[in-house]
Amino acid sequence: MKLRGKMIIVLGILFFFIQVQSGNGQVKGTDTSEHVQKCQQPLDMVLVLDNSGSMKKNDPQFLTREVVTKFMGGFGGKCRIAMVIFDQEVELAESLMDTKDPDARARFLKSLNKINYKGQFSNIPAAIERAIYEIKTRGRKDAQKIIIFMTDGIVDTGDKKDDFEREKWLKQDLAKESKKQGIRIFSIAFTNTADFSLIQTLALKTDGEYFRAYGPDDIQNVFEKIKQAIAGLPQKADSLTPPKVRPVTTAALKKKEEKPKPSTARAIAPSPITIEVTAPPSKNEPPPRKDDIFSHLILAGIVILLGVTIIIMVLIIKSRSLTKERLITKTRAIPSADLIDVENVTGNKTLSLNKRITKIGRNPDNDVVVAKDTVSGFHAMIEYKDDFFYLEDQRSMNKTYLNEEEIGPHGLRRLKSGDEIMFDIYKFLFILPDQIPSGATVIHFDAESDTMVYDDAGVAMKESSAQDDLAVQRAMLVDVKGITNEKSIILKKRITRIGRGIKNDITIPKETVSGFHAMIECRDEFYYLEDQRSRNKTFLNNEAIAPNSPVKLKSGDEIKFNGCEFVFLLEDQFPSGDTDERL
């Protein structure tokens, strides 16, 4: 039998013993265990704070900031907290962050200063939607999910018709989505003019609660009640509430003697003033007997034993999974792949992707370090799985782009050789050296016939024969912007002519490119770039080269023909460093 099936059986046995022992589905004598468990359970919480101008009347001293500061420190080490601030606009001021991280806490407290109560309107539905989305995409599966919503008004975007539709969207669709995701919404209203129908609906449909805070002094008390509700502590009279103590007069006792009724209380003080202890409506239970205590001890031992068994099984499963993953990793080698640093911002022209997960960002502990302020600490990653490489943005501030198209946070995009990747504005090329990138070459020739090249006027420039097509070191040009409609162009000839004229080997249909703009020649086992006295120059690594002065090329060099960008690559060699050799 598989281990997973055994674990299910063990859990079933544990549940059976607990049911038998409790009789009601609850373990006797452990009423507070559920609350302790909730306190220790991970918590993902988003504060949604109204920043409209009317809030200043109800919180002129900005006590909300102070209370939130105290509030976020009261949930232990498993709490993550985020903040959404809204008026006419909605801003995710802070994503879910670990409250144990001092740097994250400092950023969060700094973001509280954005609360200035200067907004004109209250776009409540958009704010709740943003909070739900944050928990839905970044929340932990095993965590309590909470939204604390603070406002003093109603849905007001400046358009009454739009307000009606948005309120309907909030009460129906967003409340339903919140319930589906297991998110409880706690609402706090600051004035009698607030939309209590709205906040009550949100609370009831999501198993949350709503509160009223009519003055600065009420804010602290409300947050304490919310903290108790999240932790699962009692707020109303129930089986955990201490017995109520109330005075009973002599007349009341005589009345009870005249009409005796079943009572669950007993008198404890002499007449005329008697203290009556009223038990909860549940049946009285006799003091625990020795055999009950013994049965509790047996149950505790069973629970501990089963718990240890489950832990051992989990460790065995994890160990087997890790072993299987290691075997897969050993048997399936990662294919050769590279990132070409087009602008050389990393100091290395070519970066090998030799790990299953390559982390990219500003922090020095990344595999590819782009030390630029506009690049996030952990900006993106490239992962190899299922025989393909995938690019994934890590909720970066200034975005990740694939072939000039922004990719969403945590959305996997499969890469192909020749793809252009940008982290903010910093450009890289993804290359698979062992395969030619997708897309047909624009070079068409017949090796057995002669080829005549003409300029724009139709005058023959130079005749090339089959002798030009001898075996040369394999090289290619990657068309970064796809101007030629081809992603990659293989250099099959000893002389490759480049220009606007259609008789060139590589045709660039741009008016700013000369008819015969430049050429790339392979000789002495090296490739050379030569400008043909073009009007708008030829650039190598952002430096203009002199006309008719060949310059040696290295794999990874960037070539521009008046803004038309290409990258020169050798299939079997990717050396780093700038190209500065001239003949």
Image: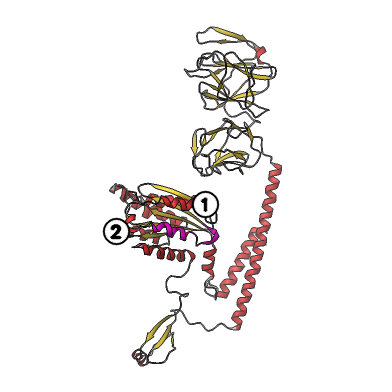
Q: How is the image coloured?
A: secondary structure
Picture coordinates of residue 310, whole percent (x, y): 64, 63
Distance (Cα) linking label 1 and label 2? 36 Å
Image quadrant in which the N terminus is located: bottom right
Picture coordinates of residue 200, whole percent (x, y): 36, 61
The amino acid beneath tag 1 is Ala
Front-lying residue, 272 or 127: 272
Q: Name the residue under label 2.
A: 193
Picture coordinates of residue 353, whole percent (x, y): 64, 37
Q: Mark 1 points at which residue?
A: 104
Image quadrant in which the C terminus is located: top right
Classify mark 2: helix, strand or loop: loop
Determine whether, in the image, residue 125 is placed left or right of residue 419. left
The amino acid beneath tag 2 is Thr
Q: Is residue 59 above or below residue 88?
A: below
Residue at left offset 52%, top offset 52% = 104
Residue 266 among magenta residues:
no
